[in-house]
Each structure stands twice: as C-alpha cells, then as structure tokens.
Amino acid sequence: MNLRIGNGYDIHRLVSDRPLILGGVNIPHHLGLLGHSDADVLTHAIMDAILGALSLGDIGHYFPPGDPQWAGADSLILLKKVHQLIQQQGWQIGNIDSVIVAERPKLKPYIEKMRNNLAAVLQLQPNQVGVKATTNEKLGPVGREEGICAYAVVLLLASQ
C-alpha cells in the first residue's frame, strides 16, 4: 500500500493569562489555550493525523503531558519531530486539510501565516496545507467560548 490517510482532533480550554497560539501564530486575544505545551490545537490535530496514518499512536505517546521537558513547548518544534518520524518510516505528506472551530477571535487574518508556518516546518508548499476556520454556532463548549478545537486529515504517500 502506498497511500495512508490519518485524521486528528484536539481541544483545549480557553483561560486567562495564556497566549492564544494556532498554527504557530500568536493571535491577540484576551484568552489563550490551557495545556502542558503551548496548547496549539491546530498543530496538535495535524500531528495526531500524521501519527494515526502510520499507526504510530498519538502525540501523548511521544510528548507525554506529565513530562517536564515538554512544559511550554513550541508545538511547531514538536511537529518537526513528528515529521522526522514519518520520513524515517519512508513516507511523505501529500496534503493536509484542517479546520479550527472557535467562536472568537476571527481567524481569517491569520490563516495564511498559519499555513506558511506549517508548510515550512513540514517542507511542503503552502498549497499543500489547507487551514479553515469556522464557528460552532454557539453550541456546546466551543460555542460557549470555553475552548477551541481543531480537526485535521492528512494524506501520506510512500517515498520514492
């Protein structure tokens, strides 16, 4: 088999006194995401999609939340480590599609920078990285602005 598909999901609670980082972009907002690392739900969902495509577990296996070395970690650095793992396994990314679900702030002004950040780390062209944003129509914990979540799908191709 020379194709693999993986999906990923992540959600983190919004709290005061934390930065809001999505796709490696620090977004001005009065709330940020709570987590052991920088809590970048978009990057975490993408990492889980990549790892899932290869049946390598999830990010908690590689970067356990109880391990102090990952406290406050930049998720783009973690993504680079995951990218090295898939390369070692003989795979490459064909494309990524993702969606961030948040009521606020409006994310459209930051999408291109997120795509560029992710593409650079993964050695892809920006047009291989889809990032969309939507709301949850005020439904559930995301709709009540208690958190932000992200979904991602990745297509992996066997390296030549």
Image (cartoon, helix red, strand yellow):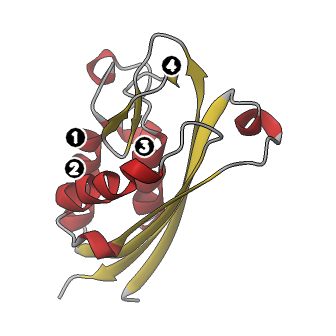
| Vertical order, 56 against 17 (above or below) | below
In the rendered image, the vertical position of residue 125 relative to residue 152, given as above or below: below
Query: Residue 56: in sight, yes or no?
Result: no
In depth, the one of 149 and 139 nearer the eye is: 139
Q: Nearer the viewer, mark 3 or mark 2?
A: 2
Residue 114 at x, y percent in the picture: 33, 52
Q: Nearer the viewer, mark 4 or mark 1?
A: 4
Pointers 2 and 1 in contact (C-beta within 8 Å): yes
- Separation of marks 3 and 4 at Cα, in angstroms: 27 Å
Q: CA distance from mark 3 to mark 1?
A: 13 Å
| Quarter in which the C terminus is drawn | bottom left
Q: Residue at x 70, y 37 (%)?
A: 142
Amino acid type assigned to the residue bearing label 4 in the image:
His
Q: Earlier in the sequence, mark 4 or mark 1?
A: 4
- Side of 112 relative to 6 (left or right): left
- Element type where label 2 sits in the image: helix
Q: Residues within 10 Å of mark 2 (few under 14, many from 20)?
A: some
Q: Amino acid at mark 1?
A: Ile
Chain-order first, disc 3 or disc 1: 3
* Disc number placed over residue 97 in the picture, else none: none
Q: Is residue 14 above or below residue 129?
A: above
* Label 1 CA crowd tier, 10 Å (few <14, some 14–19, many 20+): few
Tell me the kind of residue under disc 3.
Ile
Query: Which residue is farthest top?
Result: 17
Element marked by disc 3? helix
**Disc 2 target residue:** 80
Which residue is located at x 30 percent, y 41 percent? 24
Mark identifier at residue 77: 1
Residue position marked by numbered label 4 in the rendering: 30
Tell me, for residue 59, which label it has, or none: 3
